[in-house]
Amino acid sequence: MRPSRPLQELRFAIEEFHCAYADVLDRGDVERWPEFFTEDAVYRIIARDNLEANMPLCLMLCDGMGMLRDRAYAIAHTEMFAPRYVQHHINMTRVIGVDGRFVTAEANYLVFETLIDEPTKLLQAGKYRDQFLEMDGELLLRDRLCVFDTVVVPNCVVYPV
Amino acid sequence: MRPSRPLQELRFAIEEFHCAYADVLDRGDVERWPEFFTEDAVYRIIARDNLEANMPLCLMLCDGMGMLRDRAYAIAHTEMFAPRYVQHHINMTRVIGVDGRFVTAEANYLVFETLIDEPTKLLQAGKYRDQFLEMDGELLLRDRLCVFDTVVVPNCVVYPV
Amino acid sequence: MRPSRPLQELRFAIEEFHCAYADVLDRGDVERWPEFFTEDAVYRIIARDNLEANMPLCLMLCDGMGMLRDRAYAIAHTEMFAPRYVQHHINMTRVIGVDGRFVTAEANYLVFETLIDEPTKLLQAGKYRDQFLEMDGELLLRDRLCVFDTVVVPNCVVYPV
């Protein structure tokens, strides 16, 4: 039962990563969001029922740093959506496997959104299925698949989750 | 202030247990749910106001592996409820005490439920009051008391929490 | 990437602190709430938009143990609000810095509130910005700034968060 020390340290490091990731997005500093990814990273947000039905359509898809940066820039510099606060709750981090410098892990997330003069609403409940790459003593996402239960979103998803 | 190493390891192991437990239920694999319990385990879901008033009526009660398996089978093989996704968020795990191979612990939980074509709703907020047994280097639940605040449930509780 | 052992131990200790803090408030034992603070502690609840606009108006402000005790006493002994259950979910604890016996840390919180005969509601989503003092091997809050996103609260904030 007693887990190995390295597994505890690894989960700790991933949890620190999640905190930093959430902090950047929740502060609205979306242009720093791509810094959490490798150059060849894939980022997808997909509905759970689509995934389970092998339907590949994603709510958001970024394949590589160029698309990540493009997406971040678009969000930061277009203001076609109402101002809002976002808060990520990323918990239940679980290391699934380690293969050399690659770490597979999962976490549950809740994203809450607050529009001015409205109560805070749960925007999305989902699960991250992540592949991290350990580079120069640092973790970066090589693949983040965000699988969300919430098929009906209260409004629209404008920020990454 | 600095906690002993064994306490950290124990909490880590319980958190891993919670992740595995949630994963099985959230995948809808309810027939594997009894595997998290000892043969003589007791599982109860009770409203906080009932518990505090010493009213023993439970929303769900399973006394022993037979009842756990029976309940899981019934859920898996009767389809008298609408399809839904469930997501558990089990956090704030706290070891209360250790007595030989028995570990007393608590955790807060949120269960979110998503019915097709509806936004995700908080089904239940509550607290687990657990007794684990450490057997062959593995944790199993000997007693799980789920005490929920949410007296009015949005719909009905069909899965275990 | 691999964090130092002391940082893990420190975060563990703060998480234990959060659990104990939440437990006291969630049990309704508000008169024990001041025990988590130093004599000269400052406790504030402030809306995120106020903070970001440098508007100092707080929803609640206690400067020093006298005000903390006074507030706790008032809540415990006046019953001008409907009975309710409260549950804190304090997660994503992150140590920001350590300076001698002072520890700066953050955590995300969700406070859920259940009034009799109503579903559980999210009362407030926010972030603690904390300064702890380590005294006699124990952590105490010297400064807790609760920054909440939820500008519109469903009802009223009667308990501390």
Image (cartoon, coloured by chain):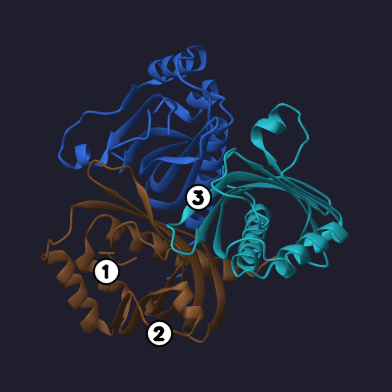
Chain colours: A brown, B cyan, C blue
Q: Position of residue C62 (x, y in %)?
A: 35, 23
* Pointer 2 residue: A56
Nearer the observer, disc 1 or disc 2? 2
Chain bearing tag 2 is A
Q: Amino acid at mark 3?
A: Leu
Tag 3 secondary structure:
strand
Quadrant housing the N terminus of chain B: top right
Do badges 3 and 2 share one subunit? no
Location of residue A148 with respect to B155 vertically, above or below:
below
Pick the residue in front: C41 or C80.
Answer: C80
Tag 2 secondary structure:
loop
**How many neighbours does mark 1 have within 10 angstroms: few (below 14), some (14-19), or many (20 or more)?**
many
For residue C152, which numbered disc appears in the image? none
Residue situated furthest front in the rendering: B80
**How many neighbours does mark 2 have within 10 angstroms: few (below 14), some (14-19), or many (20 or more)?**
few
Query: How far is disc 3 from disc 2 in space, using C-alphas?
Result: 28 Å
Residue B53 seen in render? yes
* Pointer 3 residue: B122
Residue A1 seen in render? no
Mark 1 vs mark 2: which is more N-terminal? 1
Q: Position of residue C52 (x, y in %)?
A: 19, 43
Query: How far is disc 1 from disc 2 in space, using C-alphas?
Result: 24 Å
Do badges 1 and 2 share one subunit? yes
* Pointer 1 residue: A33
